[in-house]
Each structure stands twice: as C-alpha cells, then as structure tokens.
Image (cartoon, rainbow, N blue to C red):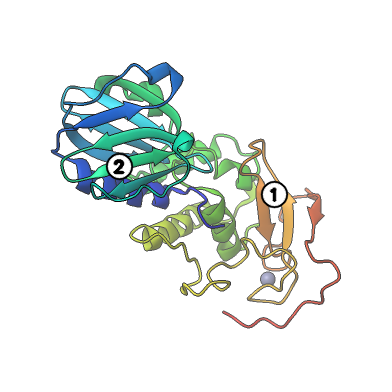
Amino acid sequence: MDGVPEGDTVWLAAQRMNTALAGATLRRGELRVPQLAGVDLAGATVREVVPRGKHMLTRFEDGRTLRTHYRMDGSWHIYRPGTKWRGGPAFAIRAILVTDRWECVGYRLHDMALVRTADEDQLVGHLGPDVLGPDWDMAEALRRLRSDPDQQIGVAILDQRNLAGIGNLYKVESLFLSGVHPWARVADVPDLEGLVDRARTLMLANRDRPEQSTTGTLRRGEDHWVAGRTGRPCRRCGTTILLGDQGPDLQERVTWWCPTCQAATSPIDPMARTGEPGRPPRLPTAT
Ligand SMILES: [Zn+2]
C-alpha cells in the first residue's frame, strides 16, 4: 500500500512545498509535458502551495495557478541546491521549480495544467467538500453521497465529486472500522456520518507524517486492519480477509474486507477471491 496517493499524502506534500516555495521567486521553472513545454516560469514568485482534495495547486503572484496530480505514481521531491536528485530517471521528471534555496522536482506528475488563479474552478470546481480542507462541510458531503442512494458505498466514498481526498486505503479501513460491507448501498449504511467521520479522523491522524497507520501502530505489517491483508486472519475475529474488485476506476477498485465484521446489508454478492486459499487462518494477534 505504500505510496498510494491519498488526500493526506498530498496535504503533507503541499505543506512542505509551501514551506519551501512561498514568497520565493523561481530562478528556474520548467514544465516537461508537451502542452506546457514552452512555458518558462523563471522570474515568477510563488504565493502559496495548497492542496485541494488530491490535487496540488501552486499559486503565483502573477495570477497563475499550476495544478498537478499524483494519480498512482507521482511525487514531488525537495532538494537543497547541489544535492543529487533521486526521485527517478530524468525522463520521469515533469516539473522543475528552483529557487535560491530549494529545488523542487516533480516526478511522474499527471493532469498538469496552468490556468489563471481566478479560473481554478475549471480544474477543481467539480470536487466535493475537501476532507482535510479548512472549509470541510460534512452536511454537504452527506448530501452528495445520499443523492445516489443505490450506489455502492465503496464506490461512492471514493468519488471525488462527493467528497475530495479519500483514496483506497482510507476507504477500506474506514468501512472495516464502521462494520460496513463495501458493496452495501449508500441508503443501507446505518451511520453514514460516522463512516465519513471515521475516514476523516484517520486522515487527520496521518497527515503530518509520510506513514499511514489506521491501527495506532506504525509497525510494518500491523499498520492496517484489512488493506493488503488478503487471506490473512482478521485482527478482530480471525475470519479470513477477502479481496475483491469494485468500481469503475481500474486503478482504485481493489477492496479488502472481513466478511464477519462487515456483514452484508444488501443482497449483493460480490465476486471475492482469497489470495492464499491453502493457508489456514491464524489466531488474531493484534487489536
Ligand atoms: Zn473480522
């Protein structure tokens, strides 16, 4: 699960980028995607870097905004001048923002766009309330989720138009902790607000560090309840954790769940597969 982009990953990256760049003038500013290849950002002063859901917005004093998105594999690396860049091969570099003090290098970034700051809504206006945003609005998120009551909750909670920032890890972990089957209809989730609040609490707990733990321990192999644990015993009840495919997005449709702790509330029987069918369940060891 390491490296899977979630809202808290982008939030932390934006804080670090903001610390490095806010108020500084770029000595070098290159964007290495075909549609922006002619743009030279040298001389532009960065006003701020802010997260919006899983999007990162770098705003300049001259009224422009650079939007980047991690998707599944992107990252920003920040180096002191003269340090060797280690984020990947040179051909994977999509953006280079250099000041007198820092060199920010974006690898494998996606959806790069440069717009007038006043037109940011063209890029992110479709997003629902930002789970980690200063303007988080639970009521509006619930309204959007409930507008499609027949949708599977495991799909709806990932839909960034409903609420922005939740990725696959916090989806599966909050569903487990709330005892909700991933294929349950939104209308059948007994405590939808509790589920969303649980996901948000997990993200808030992790946003200041690169590690993502949902169990309270950062120890490797013990940091998640169900994510990445196909065929292993549930930490609560010992039942074998299942893995299934869910949703239209090929990149984010893998779902883990415990069929006992997350008993189905809808008459939907997902096609499930276990990763290690020959392996007997072990007794639960962590709580
Ligand atoms: Zn269980």
Q: Eyeballing the image, is 204 above or below 245?
A: below
* Image quadrant occupied by the N terminus: bottom right
The answer to whether residue 57 shows anywhere in this view is yes
Eyeballing the image, is 232 above or below 285?
A: above
Identify the amino acid type marked 2. Answer: Cys
Report the residue that reaches farthest toward the right. 278
Is 121 left or right of 27, judged from the image as shown?
right
On the picture, is 94 further left or further right than 159? left
Task: Give the left or right position of residue 210, taking residue 151 as reference.
Answer: left
Q: Tell me residue 155's x, y (percent).
A: 62, 42
| Residue ID at (80%, 66%) | 276
For mark 2, give the secondary structure.
strand
- Give the quadrant of residue 278: bottom right
Expressed as whole percent of the image width and height from the top left, the position of residue 145 reads 53, 40
Q: Splitting the image into four quadrants, where does ligand 1 fall?
A: bottom right
Numbered-mark total = 2
Q: Nearer the viewer, mark 1 or mark 2?
A: 2
In the image, is 142 to the left or to the right of 27?
Answer: right
Above or below for 114 versus 245 = above
Q: Which mark is residue 104?
A: 2
At x 56%, y 67%, the residue is 224
Q: Assign a secondary structure to mark 1.
A: loop
Q: In the rendered structure, find residue 183 and report the number of the disc placed on it.
A: 1
Residue under the point 17% across and 45% down: 101
Where does residue 138 sit, x and y in percent of width and height?
40, 46
On the question of residue 125 being in view, the answer is: no
